[in-house]
Amino acid sequence: DLPWSMWIDLALRRARVETFLGRHDVAIAVLGDAMRFRGTSFCTQAATTCRRIVIAALRALDGKQAIVALETFLALPGWERGPWAVEAARAAAEASSRVGAPVF
């Protein structure tokens, strides 16, 4: 079993690589799994990185994958405040409208 700090680092690196390769669905799955298995504190320690990965996914994904990205966004600790909060909220609103949420 890896030490906690190494596990966080490797998971974040994998999510970043998947994002850079355009595999946003995989990146969101990595973050989602990490938050489910290690708790949301996973993204507390790397809030900006997690948020930027989620923003990229929200902008790129459609359909069910966008819904998973929205769920991951809402699971981020402090999603409504801090660096990139406004940008993340905009990306979430745009993704919501693409999957059929009412626009107002």
Image (tube, grey):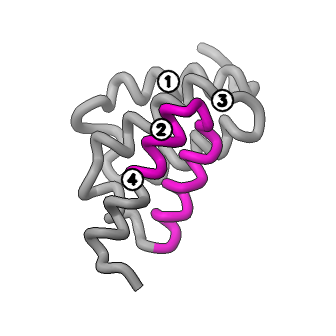
Which amino acid lies under the numbered mark 1 shown in the image of this protein? Answer: Ala
Mark 1 = which residue? 91
Rendered position, 14 above or below 25: below
Who is closer to the viewer here, 74 or 22? 22
At 52% from the left and 68% from the top, the residue drawn is 36
What's the CA distance linking mark 3 and mark 1?
11 Å
**Residue 61 percent across, percent down from the top left:** 66, 29
Labels 3, 1: front one: 3
Residues drawn in magenta: 12-37
Mark 2 = which residue? 54
Q: Quadrant of residue 53?
A: top left
Query: Is disc 1 placed on a helix, strand or loop?
Result: helix
- The number of numbered badges drawn on the structure is 4
- Of pointers 3 and 1, the one earlier in the residue sequence: 3
Is residue 8 toward the left or the right of residue 93 in the image? Answer: left
Residue furthest to the top: 104
What's the CA distance linking mark 1 and mark 2?
9 Å
- Of pointers 1 and 2, the one earlier in the residue sequence: 2
Which amino acid lies under the numbered mark 3 shown in the image of this protein? Answer: Leu
Which amino acid lies under the numbered mark 2 shown in the image of this protein? Answer: Val
| Circle 1 residues within 10 Å: few <14, some 14–19, many ≥20 | many
Q: Quadrant of the N terminus?
A: bottom left
